[in-house]
Amino acid sequence: MPQAKLIGLPARDTPAELKTAAGHRRGFPVDLLRQASSRLQILSLVGAGLWIMGPALAHMALYLSDPGNPRWAEFGASESICAAGVLLSLGLYAYLRSGQHDPGLVMDLALVYMVACAALIGLMIHWEPAWATPMDARPMITWTGPVILMFAALVPASPWKMAIAGLVAASMDPLGMIIAHAAGTYPHGSALTAFMMHYPSYLMVGVAVVISHVVTRLGKQVARERELGSYRLGELLGRGGMGEVYRASHRMLARPAAIKLIHPEVLAARDRKSAGLAVARFRREAEAAAQLRSPHTVELYDFGETEDGTLYFVMELLEGMDLETLVRKEGPLPQQRVIHILRQVCESLEEAHVSSLVHRDIKPANIHVGRVGLQHDFVKVLDFGLVKSVLPTAGEDSMATAAGLTPGTPAYMSPELAMGEKCDGRADLYALGCVAYYLLTAQLVFDAASGFQMIAKHIQELPGPPSQRTELDVSPELDRVVLACLAKKPEDRPQSAAELDRMLAEIEIEPWSEEEATRWWRTHQPA
């Protein structure tokens, strides 16, 4: 299933030792674990490079210091061990790149990789000491210690796991010495001598456990900070201009949800008065949006403000994809399906407009289509975060204006909104006309090199009919409806979402049926 806004199923919690007051385990955030998985990919590639460069540079150094020594051109046991290290590292990289894996399993695999690298290092440095290591039995620091410290800093493992893996990894040096002694390639081989020569690696294990403790505590602190009231945040789903969206669940109901965070630096203006105004407008507009009950409007469960000033929306979690993702994957849509989608958007907008609310950011990315219960191609209008009341507000600016933000998206912005004039629900209908154009043609109404040029074209230029920019059938009646929505003057457009819905219903073409929708979703997005 594609990664899109407010999409997905609840992720499995990762293990943790610390519990919340409600008795739920608080683990390392899944999105941070996935970032660590990405770092492990890079680390495995770096490891493969080091296993290649290490012996290559050793051979070069031997040649420069002793050109007469034939060893510089020979391939022996040390080189075979390095080759095994290369294969091990590339194998791990290939596995991590093969698809999504359980982040907790990947972290355990990282510790196994650390131990395996330590074993290869222990064998390599003791197998051929005549040219690779000193012959006496003094304490020595090998690459094993730095490797343990590096993994402790990059892999968020619990301290007890790091302690066990670290002790095993540190023991690979004395074990390698004992094996090399048994094979007759190393002069020192007693257990006591082997341990005493490599005690610095064991000291580094203690440091690694401290580092691991700090890293895991920071991760749990992030998880704790993400707890908003009765909701517990999970993995990051996406970022946008207004903030971040996280997967979440209700503590008591275990109900999946999506939480959008709007950070203080986004809403807060340069002075306290404007910041307070932004928060006040947020609360008032969120309360209004929470009253919307259309089944085609994303349901707002809750909203509020955290102690650090972060504002948040708690919304239903949806299954499917947004229209922008749909068109990018499938290209232009048949006109029957476009009409089916548009009419559902009209139902959502009509309720908002009757309640004196204007969305102001209607675009394909904010219209979700998917499965709800047994219904397919069910539309939900998302992101009422820029919603504005058209009722008198005693001179107060809207939330977005108070925050110093430009409402809307240039490619879908009505002329009056672009020019900063007073707007009503007909601005949303203009944007919906742009959406219809995009669905029918997989192209924007206007092409422009910048946002300013795009806005200028929406203000000045007349668009051609969608039928001229697609190979699919578009009826003349649908052409006229779309162009009516794209009229420059609000009074020349449909005067309400209900009127636009009637115009779409009167187009005489075969309607998009539930059977067709079900067949499409079963083929393209099987459950």
Image (cartoon, rainbow, N blue to C red):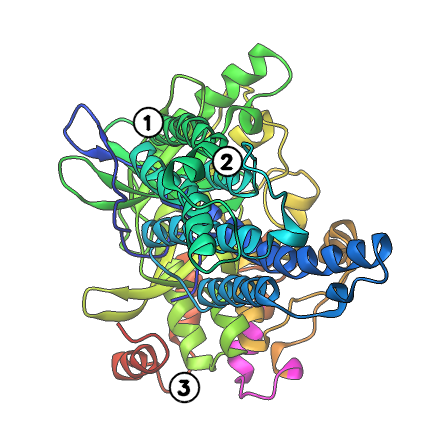
User: What residue is shown at x 48% (from left), y 67% (from top)?
Assistant: 91
Q: Nearer the viewer, mark 2 or mark 3?
A: 2
Marks 1 and 2, the one that precedes in the sequence: 2
In magenta, the rendered stretch is: 468-482
User: What residue is shown at x 25% (from left), y 36% (from top)?
Assistant: 16
Residue 321: percent from left, percent from top: 41, 63
Marks 3 and 1, the one that precedes in the sequence: 1
**Residue 509's mark?**
3
Note whether residue 236 is visible: no
**Residue 224's mark?**
1
Q: Amino acid at mark 3?
A: Ile
Residue occupied by mark 2: 149
User: What residue is shown at x 28% (from left), y 56% (from top)?
Assistant: 9
Q: How far is disc 2 from disc 3 in space, using C-alphas?
A: 68 Å
User: Do the residues under discs 3 and 1 have CB atoms within 8 angstroms?
Assistant: no
Q: Is residue 503 above or below residue 126?
A: below
Label 1 sits on a secondary structure element that is: helix
Q: Is residue 13 above or below residue 394?
A: below
Q: Nearer the viewer, mark 1 or mark 2?
A: 2
Q: How far is disc 3 from disc 1 in space, using C-alphas?
A: 54 Å
Pick the front one: 165 or 448: 165
Note whether residue 42 is visible: yes
Residue 48: percent from left, percent from top: 59, 60
